[in-house]
Amino acid sequence: MTCSRCLLRLPSVILRGQSARLVQCRILLRSTSCSQISVLHNTHNQVLRLFHSSPVCPKSRPVPAEFNNEEKEKKDKSLITHDDLFERVAKETKSKATFNKVVDIFLKRDVRRRGHVEFIYAALKKMPEFSVERELAVYNKLLDVFPKEVFVPRNFIQRMFNHYPRQQECGVQLLEQMEANGVVPNIETKVLLVQIFGEKSHPMRKYQRIMYWFPRFKHVNPFPVPRQLPGDPVDLARFSLTRIANDLDAKITVYQLPHTDLTESGEEITVPHIVGIQSPSQMEMLARHNPSRPVFVEGPFPLWLRKTCLYYYVLRADPLPSDVKIEEPYDPDRCLIYPLQLDLDLDRDLGDDESFDVDDLDEGPVFAMCMTNHGDQATLNQWISGLQQNNPILGQVPTLFRLDAGPRELQGVETDSQQSHPHRSDPKAQRGEMQPEEEEIIMEEELKRSQGMKQ
């Protein structure tokens, strides 16, 4: 260190004593080489080896108020989370355009993409709110947030020790969300992963597994459900009943379309839709049904189509007793592809046991099904009246309604279920509506049936 560059300022020293005075000293720097020690002399030619500053003296210079305000603003900006960024940008509408706008704002904020991992995690969490969880272009845009060629391992040691594990876990999480939503990556996704993490990385292996299994399982479901379900309730009921019936000969009938009527007092009444399905084989079974045995309208039964829950009702009868039931022989020409009965003459040993311990449970025949958004007894009576046109035997058979409240998590609020199904709260009132003669006949039939089942 040269003498010209080593300039020191001697702080003021407070001398002890009654008469304290401020002494200024100057520095005498005498050295011919860098290793020479500087010696300080005071006015009395005494050497001062050590200098101790008073605790009153500030150790650092005071910072101006302007710089303090700037530091506070920076801290406040750093405390703003990425969730708040999504909420501020998308105040009015949450759509794909606003989501891409938030990503563009983050990309323009910093060239080095600081905090990109936290931003991607926040974006993955917000995607369902913006309805972009099945958009491949949005996932590729989030992958583009990663800095390029920074996390690529340079040698086998870095590959072995999981180079930049936090960033790789974030990339794997993004691909797992794509897999959960059924989004198939494309060639752009592969190019981005190679540029970001390299060919020998965990996100790249996850991409290879997805591309191996997805094409094999894409069309494995013989009864696929479309991505976008029909918005019309009548069309949705038709699709659902066709899916349940599993019979190509079944015929769908719309008994009533939804509309709004005005009463005499001026009140608006919303009439629900009623859509039913019945196959020719079900019509034959209903025609052979014994008129002395009642039929039952049961429901509602839930049916889930992706995230939409629907309810359907069935018209069925109790199973016949074993002494009355007649087993009809199978028709070999009824089904040639999947025969209903096989008579194979195989060489069996004496030790072979041909009996099987199987409990056969007969739930009774199902004659028809329907869907409606109001499952009260009046609406279902209209369905039975519509069925009676093609099934005249329903005018002779007593019909009982067995309507349940259903699971609470499917019905929603308890009050709503009571309003939509007022008949469920008081099942005795239903029997009170019937005539006493019909009630006695039904009670006698149920008693006979129970006695026959016990025998």
Image: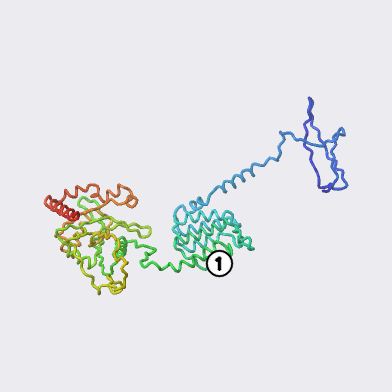
Rendered image quadrant of residue 252: bottom left
* Residue assigned mark 1: 191
Residue at the top extreme, as displayed: 18
Q: Position of residue 149 (x, y in %)?
A: 61, 62
Q: Which quadrant of the figure contains the C terminus?
A: bottom left
**Residue 221 screen position, x and y as percent:** 38, 66
Q: Quick check: 312 left or right of 215?
A: left
Identify which amino acid the numbered label 1 is placed on.
Val
The percent position of residue 261, horizontal first and vertical second, equals 23, 55
Residue 151 quadrant: bottom right
Of residue 63 and residue 99, the one placed in the foreground of this image is 99
Q: In screen coordinates, is 150 left or right of 56? A: left
Between 105 and 136, the residue placed more toward the observer is: 136
Residue 45 horizontal side relative to residue 80, left or right: right
Q: Position of residue 142 (x, y in %)?
A: 52, 60
- Colour treatment of the image: rainbow
Total numbered labels? 1
For label 1, the SS is: helix
Relative to 331, does residue 306 appear above or below in the rendering?
above
Q: Is residue 45 above or below residue 297?
A: above
Q: Please name whichever residue, 323 or 408, is drawn nearer the observer in this view of the structure.
A: 323
**Seen in the image, is 82 located left or right of residue 258?**
right
Q: Residue at x 51, y 58 (%)?
A: 173
Residue at the image point whose x is 58% and y is 64% from the top: 200
Q: Residue furthest front?
A: 350
Name the residue nearer the viewer: 396 or 454: 454
Q: Badge 1: how crowded within 10 Å, few (<14), some, or many (20+)?
A: few
